[in-house]
Amino acid sequence: MSKYDLNNSKVNPSARWNEVDHYINSLLLPNDKDLQAALEANAEAGLPSHDVTPNQGKFLQLLLKIQGASRVLEIGTLGAYSTIWMARALPDHGRIVSLESEPKHAAIAQANLTRAGLMHKVDLRVGPALTSLPDIKEEYPEPFDLIFIDADKPSNPDYLRWALRLTRPGSLIIGDNIIRDGEVIHSDSEDARVQGVRTFLECIGDHPHLEATALQTVGSKGYDGFVIARVTDSPVTK
Ligand SMILES: C[S@@+](CC[C@H](N)C(=O)[O-])C[C@H]1O[C@@H](n2cnc3c(N)ncnc32)[C@H](O)[C@@H]1O
């Protein structure tokens, strides 16, 4: 019997998800020393391993390229692993603004971005995102092409309100970690992160100018998923 036989109750399916991620990555992803160095520096500094997986980073990078994005906003930098993936997809004049509340995380992020030669494309702001966002609106009058929301989940409904102010028809808004091991379906959850994600998804679903879907994912970081919403110029029929 294969060790991956899911009918075998002794098998942990996450081992299979992990190995499939490794298989996919070995075939499709670049062997990038700066991305690897960023993960190593994050671990050495004791940062939580809450960065996107390599194949998710590549997915974000492809979305930026498909979107032709040159102005990107990220809420939740951590050690800038996702920032590096996205900054690599920007044109020469492109810019990614990344918001991080923890000074220690931001310092590691800055070192990782500097090592990767990307600091000239990144505006890294330290402080609670809800404090930084009004300044961003003042300083960046042009709408963002893509916003990646990946910080404290209870604030996701507020981040969505800001994202709608900072985008234009055609912009993409992406939210990470919205499945949460399936906990998202529990309306009576006492987890503020689950409730934040549920309200976020409900606001997206109710908004007349957002067309969206959410995908469940499995992989080396377990069972989770993301939502992708596109801002529309005319109301969406749902
Ligand atoms: C999931 S991690 C981000 C991972 C990163 N996007 C990546 O994939 O490499 C979330 C980050 O958001 C930061 N964060 C939490 N609350 C925040 C807030 N109110 N404002 C800004 N950043 C916040 C945390 O300190 C943490 O570094």
Image: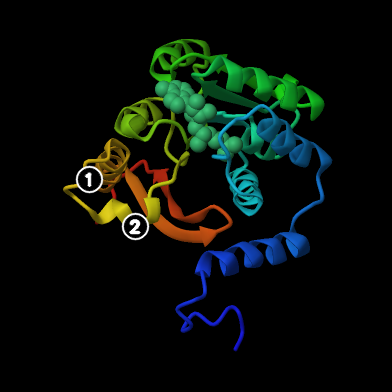
Q: Is residue 175 left or right of residue 27?
A: left
Quadrant containing the C terminus is bottom left
Name the amino acid, label 1. Answer: Asp
Does any atom of ligand 1 lie closer than 8 Å to the CB of label 2? no
* Residue under the image location 73 percent in, 37 percent down: 40
User: Disc 1 versus disc 2: distance between alpha carbons?
Assistant: 21 Å
Looking at the image, residue 89 lies above or below residue 165:
below
Label 2 neighbour load within 10 Å: few <14, some 14-19, many 20+: few
Kindly state the secondary structure of the residue where label 2 is placed.
helix
Residue that mark 1 sits on = 206
Where residue 15 appears, as percent x and y from the top left, is 58, 66
* Residue under the image location 37 percent in, 29 percent down: 159
Residue that mark 2 sits on = 182
Where residue 118 appears, as percent x and y from the top left, is 75, 26
Q: Is residue 99 left or right of residue 238?
A: right
Q: How is the image coloured?
A: rainbow
